[in-house]
Image (cartoon, helix red, strand yellow):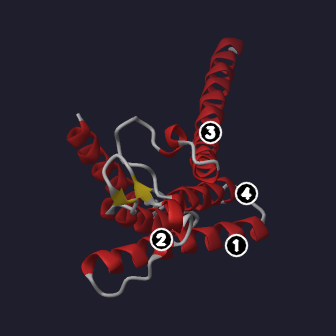
Amino acid sequence: MNEPTDIHTKQTLKVSANFWRLQTVPLWCSVIVTLTSVLVLLGWVFEIDILKRIIPGYVIMNPITAVTFLLSSAALWLIQSTDDRRNRIAQVCSVFVLLIGLIKICAVVGLFDGGIDQILFRHQLIDNDVNKPSQMAPVVAFNFVLLGAGLLMFNIKTKRRDIFLAQYPAITILLTLYFALIGYL
C-alpha cells in the first residue's frame, strides 16, 4: 500500500520540477533579449558595426527597435511578479511597446509619420552597406503591436480556465516569424 503513494510522490515531484523549468523560460528569454538589445545600443553608442547587426551584410537594427525590445523584455520580466506595482510598470512598458509599433505602422500606411525610428542616433542612421537610413521594418512594428497587446492581456482572467487571451497575439507573432525565417532561408 505504501508503494503507490511513493510513485505518486515521485510523479508529483517530477511534474513540479518540469513546471519550475517551464516557469524560467520567460525569464531566460527576457535576459537574452535584454543582453542583445544592450549590445545593439552599445554598437550605436560606440559606432561598432558588428554589434548593430546580427549577421554581417544584413540590415542594421534600428536603435528604437532595440529600445522597444528592452521595454518588452522588462515587461515580460516584471509581469510574472505578484506585486501590483511591478505589474503596473509592466503594463506601462507594454503600452509603450504597443504605441511604438502603432506609430510606425501609421507611418508605413501614410496616416502620419511621427519619425519614431529617427529619434535616436539620427546622424548615424545611414546604413553604408545598403546606403539607406535604418528603419524599423513594418512586420517588426506589427509584431510590436501584437507583443504589447499580448503583454497587456497576460494576466487577464477569463471565465474559462483553458482560455489564455495572450496566446492569440503570441501565436500570430510566431506565424509571422516563421514566414520571415522561411524568407531568410
Q: Earlier in the sequence, mark 2 or mark 3?
A: 3
Q: Is residue 156 visible?
A: no
Secondary structure found at label 4: loop
User: 10 Å neighbourhood of mark 1: few (<14), some, or many (≥20)?
Assistant: some
Q: Earlier in the sequence, mark 2 or mark 1?
A: 1
Check if mark 3's residue and mark 4's residue have beta carbons within 8 Å: no
Q: Identify the amino acid type marked 1.
A: Arg
Query: Percent position (x, y) of residue 69?
Result: 54, 56
Residue at mark 2 to residue at mark 1: CA–CA distance: 28 Å
Query: Percent position (x, y) of residue 137?
Result: 34, 60
Residue at (23, 46) in percent of width and height: 179
Q: Earlier in the sequence, mark 4 or mark 1?
A: 4
Check if mark 3's residue and mark 1's residue have beta carbons within 8 Å: no
Secondary structure found at label 2: helix
Question: Is 88 positioned to the left or the right of 122 in the image?
Answer: right
Query: Percent position (x, y) of residue 57?
Result: 35, 38
Q: Nearer the viewer, mark 2 or mark 3?
A: 2
> In the rendered image, which quarter contains the N terminus?
top right
Q: Earlier in the sequence, mark 3 or mark 4?
A: 3
Check if mark 4's residue and mark 1's residue have beta carbons within 8 Å: no
> Which residue position is annotated with label 3?
28
Residue at mark 2 to residue at mark 3: CA–CA distance: 30 Å
Residue sitting nearer the eye, 47 or 146:
47
Residue sitting nearer the eye, 84 or 78:
78
